[in-house]
Image (cartoon, helix red, strand yellow):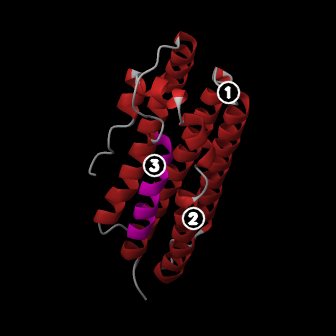
Amino acid sequence: MEGTKPVNKKLAAALSGGAVLVLALSGCGDDKNEELDKWAKSVCDDVQPQARKIEDANAAIQKQTSDNSSPKDVQKTDSKAFQDMSDAYKAIGKAVDDAGAPPVDGGEDKQKNAVKELNGISKSYGDLKTRVDKLDAGDQSKFADGLKGIATELDKLSKSGNNALQDLEEGDVGKAMAKQESCKNASAPPAGS
């Protein structure tokens, strides 16, 4: 039976994909719409600390994969990381919700869809935390098998619907967000990448 290290590497690889959702909150170009710039600034200012939280959680899991960590240490790290990610995505959803609809065509629908998606991602990470907490860290074989299932779910989560976010960020909204210093900072690559 393989140990937890190869499985946890799969977990870390899947996590990297999930971080892309938040880091996608930046674009390129520029626009003259002051109202849209104000909207983008309010979202970006709130997203930046959450993006950092997700990067830190990702880095913690990546660090565990490079160590010969015990199942209990892996479980503790993964549990905290999943909770941090759940909290961060929920906070990003709240930031987008609190900002209101961006002043663009279809802005209200784009905002509602993005908030729904972010809250769904938050719930999914919360579910993964619950699952990792329930794993038997005293039995390395069972723990590794349990991690495989979690890595599979995480991989699906990292590939699943960031469509609403991409829809929110296209066109003028993306251009306005790209001009915000806090969105530029939020899109910096994670440490160790």
Q: Quadrant of the N terminus?
A: bottom left
User: To which residue does mark 1 refer?
Assistant: 105
User: What residue is at 41 percent from the left and 51 percent from the top?
Assistant: 58
> Is 135 drawn above or below residue 165 in the view shown?
below
Q: Dot 3, how many residues are within 10 Å of its Cα: few (below 14), some (14-19), or many (20+)?
A: many
User: What residue is at 48 percent from the left and 77 percent from the top?
Assistant: 144
- Magenta-colored span: 9-22
On the rendered structure, is 56 left or right of 86?
Answer: left
Q: Is residue 11 magenta?
A: yes
In the rendered image, residue 64, in percent from the top left (x then y), is placed at 35, 60
Query: Which label lies toward us, 1 or 3?
Result: 1
In the rendered image, residue 50, in percent from the top left (x then y), is placed at 49, 35
Amino acid on which disc 1 is placed = Asp
Amino acid on which disc 2 is placed = Lys
User: To which residue does mark 3 refer?
Assistant: 19
Q: Is tag 2's residue or tag 3's residue first in the polypeptide sequence? A: 3
Give the tally of numbered discs: 3
Q: Secondary structure at mark 1?
A: loop
> Is 31 drawn above or below residue 85 in the view shown?
above
Find residue 25 and name its label.
none
Q: Secondary structure at mark 2?
A: helix
The rendered magenta stretch, by its main secondary structure, is classed as: helix
Q: Residue furthest top?
A: 34
Which is nearer the eye, 70 or 97? 97
Which is nearer the eye, 139 or 15? 15
Quarter of image, res 133: bottom right
Q: Is residue 67 magenta?
A: no
Amino acid on which disc 3 is placed = Ala
Which is nearer the eye, 130 or 165? 165
User: What residue is at 60 percent from the left and 27 percent from the top?
Assistant: 95
Q: Residue furthest left?
A: 192
User: To which residue does mark 2 refer?
Assistant: 156
